Image (cartoon, rainbow, N blue to C red):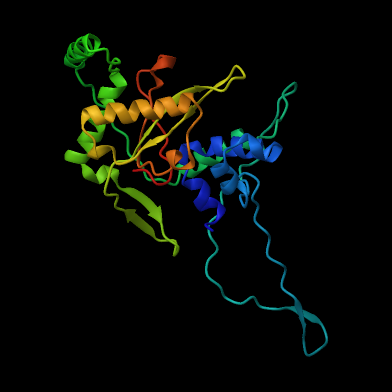
């Protein structure tokens, strides 16, 4: 079985949801599907995993009877650990609340994202033609009793086609090998993660990022069907473990909060 870091890394931005479902599983194992029960049977929360400190060296007796430290045996360099954040000063009236479960998983994801080399650029793209063509498409689909095409449908498919046809290197990813050396992961297809807003039923909302695998092999019509099927599974709470894994590109829409530009965080395994 893969170690904890490998297993949680597979879920990328969805690891917070895995932690939440794990808490549900611990409370009532029947509250999750059989596939998730099997997954959680030997799962340990990444947010509670700790490193066991090495035992101090045993003393050896010297020729004069005094104890001397036993030299440690040379070993491979230890894997780097996260830098400890120094304690913050708490103002009077403020309180500290431990982060656990979902909150801790989100923090862990944000920390992991700092290890991924990134570069950011912005470009303005005329959208008038996009708007006109969308209206033409939707007028036709309306006449035939079909659902409407959203801007996200068109933009997401355009991104997939641009990566596949023009800049296929963007589907590759950075990774660190077992020897600690950097590696390039060459992915044969575009597996796109689609951020979907979810009502959690308790008055709060969250984003899940199910993955549309091999999106570059789909026509626009096929992409629409696959996209809508993923959204349907999200709303019906029918996503499987596989639906959360494998993204090498992700798309989100922060426009609902009135932003003009934003810089998303890359998860390990992406770009």
Task: Give residue 201's position: percent from left, percent from top.
Answer: 59, 20
Q: Is residue 156 visible?
A: no
Query: Vertical placement of 203 versus 220: above or below?
Result: above
* Mark count: 0
Q: Is residue 173 left or right of residue 37?
A: left
From the top left corner, tell me how far across and down residue 133 is, in percent.
17, 15
Q: Nearer the viewer, residue 47 or 136?
A: 136
Left or right, residue 30 beside residue 186:
right
- The residue at 56%/47% (across/down) is 39
Query: Considering the image in quadrants, where does the C terminus appear?
Result: top left
Left or right placement of residue 196 versus residue 248 in this view: right
Q: Residue at x 35, y 25 (%)?
A: 228
Q: What residue is shown at x 59% (from left), y 39% (from top)? A: 19
Instruction: Place residue 140 in its image quadrant.
Output: top left
Q: In the rendered image of this protein, does residue 201 appear above or below residue 9?
A: above
* Residue sitting at x 32%, y 31%: 226
Residue 26 is situated, as x and y percent measured from the top left of the image, at: 68, 40
Q: Residue reaching furthest front? A: 144
Q: Residue furthest right?
A: 65
Q: Which one is nearer the viewer's eye here, 155 or 217?
A: 217
Q: Where residue 51 sits: x, y (%)?
A: 65, 56
């Amino acid at each position: 079985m893969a170690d904890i870091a490998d297993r949680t890394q597979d879920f990328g931005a969805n690891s917070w949801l895995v932690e939440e479902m794990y808490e549900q599983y611990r409370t009532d194992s029947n509250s999750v599907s059989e596939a998730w029960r099997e997954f959680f049977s030997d799962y340990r929360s990444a947010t509670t995993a700790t490193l066991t400190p090495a035992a101090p060296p045993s003393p050896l007796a010297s020729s004069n009877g005094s104890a001397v430290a036993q030299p440690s045996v040379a070993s491979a360099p230890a894997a780097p650990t996260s830098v400890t954040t120094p304690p913050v000063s708490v103002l009077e009236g403020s309180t500290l609340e431990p982060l656990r479960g979902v909150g801790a998983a989100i923090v862990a994801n944000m920390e992991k994202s700092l290890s991924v080399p990134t570069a950011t650029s912005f470009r303005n793209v005329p959208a008038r033609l996009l708007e006109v063509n969308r209206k033409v498409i939707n007028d036709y689909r309306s006449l035939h009793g079909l659902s409407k095409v959203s801007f996200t449908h068109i933009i997401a498919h355009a991104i997939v086609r641009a990566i596949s046809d023009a800049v296929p290197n963007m589907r590759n990813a950075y990774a660190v090998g077992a020897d600690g050396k950097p590696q390039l992961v060459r992915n044969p297809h575009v597996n796109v993660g689609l951020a979907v807003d979810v009502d959690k039923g308790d008055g709060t909302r969250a984003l899940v990022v199910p993955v549309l695998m091999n999106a570059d092999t789909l026509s626009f019509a096929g992409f629409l069907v696959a996209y809508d099927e993923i959204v349907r599974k999200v709303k019906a709470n029918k996503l499987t473990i596989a639906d959360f894994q494998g993204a090498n590109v992700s798309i989100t829409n922060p426009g609902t909060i009135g932003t003009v530009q934003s810089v998303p965080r890359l998860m390990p395994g992406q770009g």
